[in-house]
Image: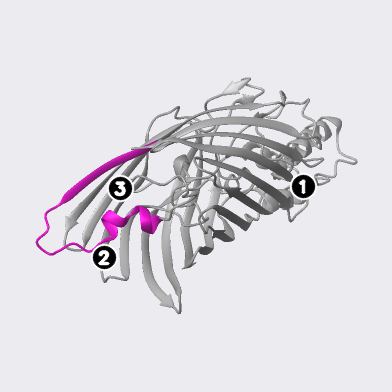
Amino acid sequence: MNADISPMRASVATFTMLSCCAALAGEPAADEVARVSVGGFGTLGVVHSSDKQSDFTANALNPGSAGYSHDWSAAVDSRAGVQMGVNLGGKWSAVLQLVAERTLNNGYGPVVEWANVKYQATPDLSLRLGRIALPLFLTGDYRKAGYALPWVRPPVELYGAIPLSSSDGVDASYRWQAGDSNNVTQLFFGRTELSLAPGARARARALTGVSNTTTTGALTLRACIMSAELSVDIARELFGGLRRYGPQGDALAGRYELSARRARVMSLGFNYDPGNWFAMGEIGRMNTHSYLGDKTAAYLGAGYRHADLTPYLVYSVSRANMETSVAGLDLAGIPAPQAAMGAQLNTGLNRLLAAIPRQHSVSAGVRWDLYPNYALKVQADRITPQHGSTGTFINVQPGFRAGRPITVLSAALDFVF
């Protein structure tokens, strides 16, 4: 959400950053005094997973806790956010957004999601400095504001693959027109750092990208390309152990360890929304050149609005573009103790590769706009990890069985103020 959270019609399935930022993006008169606007959003949600040997989560930065840990969990989708926008007069404005949601090691402590200063250089060109939303996907500008989404949550196959939602840096946005099409091209550069666990962090440096959003009539298209130097401080003992096995261990560690690797993401999406119904879909490819994988994810969804109700369907899929099981170390002819340790290292490496999501899911749900600025949603997901993959599930236990469908039931109350 952005600083001016205006009432939204029930027929609005999504809104873009440009429409949300109307209060801040406008060019005020030179003698206009500073204006402050405050708003917020939130989601109260519960989730149940039929699988008791794993936990369902929306992304890898959320502990999920629905399934093995708890029969029902409020941790997956529940969050609250507040935002303050300041129009400083002239061409300057600023925005600050705080979001409190369940994280791996911070509980529900609020974090700064956005904090940037904007300079409207011309009516068509704007520059920002600070913490900025990444325009990676169609709903990238408001993915945490559930009220703006037609579903309970964005499809986990695509959005869970890249849980990054903001970066610290600069961007430039330029509006231009081609025939009947309105375009916004955005260039961005920055970095981000996330705490995964005590002593473990994920870092994306030299995060560079370009996106373009095209709107013509009821159709919106967004394309984005992004790259970053990515490092993740987990599994260090595993890769250190592999290196003790000489050249073959060095080769495995060099192939799969995630340390200062150039990761690349490409995405393309559309949203067609003439009013009474909508159809939208996205596809993305993410290559980390590491154990996090080279994968392609996509979804296609549609919904129909009837009065205050919006039933919808979504099909999502995630596929690996690399091997997800390897022979690992050749342990023939080495002493038994070293062979036993090597076998454990091989198992650990293959567990990492098995976590590269290979699954498909079918989701059905309904949104009820029961009151202005309040929406109640219920959703059922039928998720099937492929054989040999744990899919997007986490906290996987030894009894987990891939290749069979798992039912996930969700209910969420979304609101804005």
Q: Which of marks 3 and 1 is in front?
A: 3
Residue at left 60%, top 22%?
A: 72
Q: How far apart are marks 2 and 1 (CA)?
A: 48 Å
Residue denoted by label 1: 324
Residue at left 75%, top 40%?
A: 385
Residue denoted by label 3: 3
Quadrant of the rendered image containing residue 391:
top right
Q: Which of marks 3 and 2 is in front?
A: 3
Residue at left 75%, top 51%?
A: 247
User: How far across and down, in percent of the image, does residue 211 sit?
Assistant: 48, 65
Q: How far apart are marks 3 and 2 (CA)?
A: 16 Å
Q: Is-magenta flag for residue 21?
A: yes
Residue denoted by label 2: 120
- Could you tell which of marks 3 and 1 lies nearer the N-terminus? 3
Q: Which of marks 2 and 1 is in front?
A: 2
Q: Which of 152 and 51 is in front in this view?
A: 152
Q: How far apart are marks 3 and 1 (CA)?
A: 44 Å
Determine whether the residue tagged by mark 2 lies in a helix, strand or loop: strand
Q: Residues within 10 Å of mark 1 (few under 14, many from 20)?
A: many
Q: Nearer the viewer, residue 81 or 177?
A: 177
Q: Which amino acid does label 1 sit on?
A: Thr
Q: In this view, does 414 lie above or below 204?
A: above
Circles 2, 1 touching at the beta carbon (< 8 Å)? no
Determine whether the residue tagged by mark 3 lies in a helix, strand or loop: loop
Determine whether the residue tagged by mark 1 lies in a helix, strand or loop: loop
- Which residue range is magenta in the image? 17-41
